[in-house]
Image: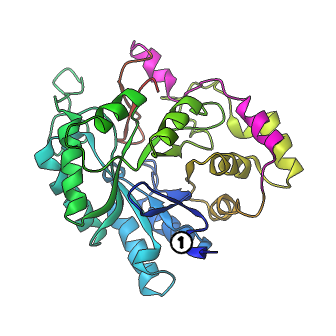
Amino acid sequence: MDLKHSRSVKLNDGHFMPVLAFGTLASDDVPKSKAAEATKMAIDVGFRHIDAAYVYQNEKEVGQAIRDKIADGTVKREDIFYTTKLWATFLRPELVRPALERSLKNLQLDYVDLFIIHIPTAMKPGEDLIPKDVSGKVILDTVDLRDTWEALEKCKDAGLTKSIGVSNFNHKLLEMILNKPGLKYKPVCNQVECHPYLNQSKLLEFCKSKDIVLVAYSALGSQRDPTWVEKDSPILLEDPIMNAIAKKHSRNPGQVALRYQVQRGVVVLAKSFNEKRIKENFQIFDFELTPEDIKAIDGLNRNFRFFQLLMRKHGYAHNEHVIMTAPWTLFIFVLTQL
């Protein structure tokens, strides 16, 4: 057995992506140094896939953590699979490579393993992560995502990234890229909200049919910030069925939620800055859910999005692109009907 790739999935460009990733998004009240500490812990525990983004504003710290673990001999650069994301203010094709180069400068790395379009909605270029007009409305930009994609292809050809992909795309947006005249590289992945309450079965089936890996964020549910999550929204990790399955396997519900994704062919992100949780989140490779377990978890699907609150608060229809900001971060979620 190829141990290096036994916990990885082969992408459509031939590279391998570890199926379990460590997420680095942190709220504004968390010191950036915590991102570095947690990333080091994650690498020590065994995580080799680090999921990050320019908009998280902590790539300097995460990059330092990776370089420290390389320097102390824990890993080699080629052992780490690093994902970064192209933010919405850089979707104009001429801004794509400079944006990636900015991340590389912050990381002090020569290349990233995966570079993905963060959201399929362009915003006014500039230094503001959330450009707004005088009335406080977000200023959007008009960009053809196919042109953006072509710029990502050039980044791959230049060796600045090994692979390229997308995030928060629905099947129509994916088809737009796949049907682009002169397409050189298909997206290797599509990162979306995905958990037992929103299992994305149709999108997963579509992605598999196109040899695109689905990557799940919010796989353990979500942080319960009242600004963007209903206070009475269900708590995934308290679900009776999840807990019953966890008890049967002598595991916790979070481990079951992560294992569920891996067994259905989904790459899954796990975010925690707590050392105990980081260790627990990695311990999903020494047990297996039964077909009955999988069926029971599939039955929990209710097409529930943890980010629906602001969709209603701001009066958007469910199938529109929705731009939402939370006070704890400058991060923006754009939701699409997937």
**Picture coordinates of residue 156, whole percent (x, y):** 25, 59
Question: Which quadrant of the view contains residue 169?
Answer: top left
User: Which residue is located at x 56 percent, y 38 percent?
Assistant: 194
**Picture coordinates of residue 315, whole percent (x, y):** 39, 12
**Residue 96 painted magenta:** no
For label 1, the residue is 43
User: Which residue is located at x 66 percent, y 65 percent?
Assistant: 279
Q: Which of 258 and 135 is in front in this view?
A: 258
* Mark 1 Cα-neighbour bin, 10 Å: few <14, some 14–19, many ≥20: many
* Vertical position of residue 200 compared to residue 281: above or below: above
* Secondary element at image label 1: helix
**Residue 317 in view in this figure:** yes
Q: Which of 206 and 66 is in front in this view?
A: 206
Q: In this view, does 305 lie to the left or right of 330?
A: right
Q: Which of 326 and 304 is in front in this view?
A: 304
Seen as rendered, the residue at the extreme right is: 248
**Residue 311 painted magenta:** yes
User: Which residue is located at x 67 percent, y 28 percent?
Assistant: 301
Question: Which quadrant of the view contains residue 68?
Answer: bottom left
Residue type at mark 1: give it. Ile
Q: Nearer the viewer, residue 279 or 276?
A: 279
Q: Quick one: quadrant of the N terminus? A: bottom right
User: Which residue is located at x 18 percent, y 49 percent?
Assistant: 151
Region of the chain picked out in magenta, as a range = 288-317
**Residue 99 in view in this figure:** no
**Picture coordinates of residue 214, whole percent (x, y):** 50, 44
* Vertical position of residue 4 compared to residue 23: above or below: below
Question: Which quadrant of the view contains residue 103?
Answer: bottom left
* Vertical position of residue 300 compared to residue 12: above or below: above
**Picture coordinates of residue 143, whole percent (x, y):** 17, 32
Q: In this view, does 159 lie to the left or right of 186?
A: left
* Vertical position of residue 299 compared to residue 28: above or below: above
